[in-house]
Amino acid sequence: MGEATILPLELDRVSFVVGGAPLISDVSCTLAAGPRTVILGPNGAGKSLLLRLCHGFLQPTSGRVLWHGANGVDPLRFQAMVFQRPVMLRRSAAANILYALKLRGIPRPERERITADVLGRTGLARLADKPARVLSVGEQQRLALARAWALKPQVLFLDEPTASLDPAATFAVEGIVNAIRAGGTCIVMTTHDLAQARRMADEVMFLHHGRLLEKTPAASFFAAPASEPARAFLKGELSW
Amino acid sequence: MGDIGEAFAAAIRLVVGLDRSLIEIVLLSFQVNLSAVAAATVLGLPAGAALALVQFPGRRAAIVLANALMGLPPVVVGLIVYLLLSRAGPFGVFGLLFTPTAMIVAQVILVTPIIAALTRQILEDLWQEYEEQLRSLGAGPGRAMGALLWDGRYSLTTVVLAGFGRASAEVGAVMIVGGNIDHVTRIMTTAIALEVSKGDLALALGLGIVLILLSVGVNTLVLVMREAMQREQG
Amino acid sequence: MVSAIVAPAKAGVQEQPAGFAALDSRSRGPLAGDSPADPRRGNDEGDAFRSLFASLIAILLATLLASGTAPAADRFITVASTTSTQNSGLFEHLLPQFTRKSGIEVRVIAVGTGQAIKLAEKGDADVLLVHHKPSEEKFVADGFGVKRLDVMYNDFVIVGPKTDPADVKGLKDASAAFKRVAEKKAMFASRSDDSGTHKLELELWKAAQIDPKAHSGVWYRELGSGMGATLNTATGLSAHALSDRASWSQFKNKGDLAILVEGDPRLVNQYGVILVNPAKRKHIKAKDGQAFVDWLVSADGQKTIADYKIGGEQGFFPNAAKATN
């Protein structure tokens, strides 16, 4: 099972309606392992919502979210998510990671080893015993990534992971995301930062008013967006 | 002023003299109050956590009820427990009336809603912050409750202290179900009430001062332990 | 586990489980799903909780066992009596002597006579020692008590401000004194708690042909309190009050109050003792309760009562009928 993958992920005519207002409308697409997918779109386009539908936090009003490789296992166990504002449990940096591993049923010696490993990889080893909540926001986001990394997810969802960070911390976070991807994890992130999208995207999904207007390789999206809203968005005419 | 001065003198005499009956009363007070708070904590923390994050029909009504029961009048609780434990009542066969156990039962009823209601409030706020992260990590409701209780531990110590305050300050319920029997069910508050009824206001206030000192002692101890823990674990 | 095979052609396709909402509906129980993967000791919250809750429950069990079993192991009886006897200090003098001689501990619940009788009716006391003869006789007549015996008496006094605003000082007629208090609209603090003292007070008002309740809240204050609390209030209000002599003598917060009226034969305060009827309430410790009753009216018990002094003066006067000896 370890080598099997829950991917591809298929969204089959997914809609999400709250109080009669369609926030996500009829989105169909397939995400496969490989490219880093960046979900772009102006403010209120439904980027975070789509991420949460994929991650299973929300149930589509209609349509289905299908993990074709799940084969009877709980797909959530092979995913992780990092939020715009890192959620730190009130315990040490290391304990935050140990706890996540414990929830996944990893045996203790293994937990200790993995924790030390990811703390080292994210440059947080010297902060291991510090209470997580006294770390800087940048350090906290790195810890959140370390925690996600420790779970060795097949898919990592990132919701505006650098929106609260300064450029240096943003750079560090992007480096870690790429390192995680190098380990074979599929990356799906939202951002409102076009420069970041250009740096990080292999593939772009462009959302507008809850509709998926484009899903194309990043190069062609930035060179020649197919839809009018995407063109306006790239020119900065739509508020992000 | 004279009475208050005398009261402090009486308090000092009581403490310095290590009056034997005072020690007996203090020990019984602690036994009753701590047991009641321990039981109320065992019941109230999970109940509060469940109210905070498990959705069930009637949840809102249960929250309103828990909040309302924080203000239960001790005398009413005393009366209810008395009627239940009375020889003529449904649990009369156990012969628990006028024992410390009866006092503990009454105080558990008084303290549990306080602990449950305050726990619910604290954990609900914490749950707002944690919900998505814990769900993402795959924590089920039981695990999530555990994490919330643990991460809310510093705030929850205050909740337990509030419960202890209620238990140790209360006289109406323990007077009725305990009977204020010398050497058996006489605790600080009922002893104070007795001295007041004897018109020995200085001694009563002296006992009151001792009670306040004990309460300050307990709270200081908890605060120190909590700060040590916080330094270590954050 | 919520699982849905979507298309037969794609065996193994898994629909996203219903997120967190589904956690509650998964086949495993919410807590059962949380069994630790690794039972070894550690510093995470699961272990901390287990030890915390274990210790809380241990405290609890220890206390419940200690408190729940100890009384049953001892030999004791419960006596429902009045606040006036408790406040007088008589019990602290009397009971240790009985316990020493009989090996029976006596636990006193001190409440008003009315409440004491209610306690005994419910079977929550083995012996009743109170001071309102009509109520006591009714208690026996109703079958709750075995027999009523006189034990001792002292007397009631009317206390009031030393300045004597109602001009009652030295009167030998309690009703006449009450009448003057009413005429002068001088403050009067009433127990109003259905106690023996309160019942006597109402009888005196009746003899004076005054309905004090008509003035309740004006000069007549109905406190609903025990003897001590009533005297505290009387001190604060500079009010008159009816008190038994023993409670008054022992009372420490007299303020500017003093005894104004005493010596009326109606002010005699007779105490009676009754064993609660074991035929009516099967938990009653009839044998040990009877031993206490017998001792109180015995020569030895009567002498012990007579020996009790308050401020150098005899507090209670034993008057058990010789025949019961």
Image: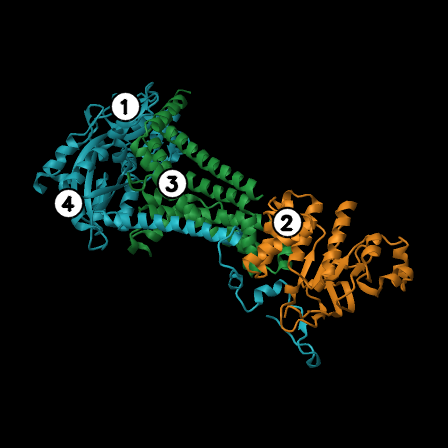
Mark 1, Cα crowd under 10 Å, few <14 / some 14-19 / many 20+, is many
Q: Residue C298, position in %: x, y?
A: 11, 39
Q: CA distance from mark 3 to mark 1?
A: 41 Å
Instruction: Give the foreground label among 1 and 4.
Output: 4
Of marks 1 and 4, which one's residue comes earlier in the chain? 1
* Of marks 3 and 2, the one in the foreground: 2
Q: Which chain is orange?
A: A
Q: Which mark is residue A229?
A: none
Q: Is residue B148 above or below residue B210?
A: below
- Left or right for B102, reference A15: left
Relative to the observer, which residue lies in front, C296 or A79?
A79
Circles 3 and 2 on the same chain: no
Of marks 4 and 3, the one in the foreground: 3
Chain that bears disc 2: A
* Chain identifier, green in the render: B
Q: Which residue is mark 4?
A: C291
Q: Which chain is cyan?
A: C
Residue C197: where, in percent of width, then height? 28, 35
**Residue C43 placement, left or right of B17:** right
> In the rendering, which numbered label is found on residue A88?
2
Q: Residues within 10 Å of mark 3 (few under 14, many from 20)?
A: some
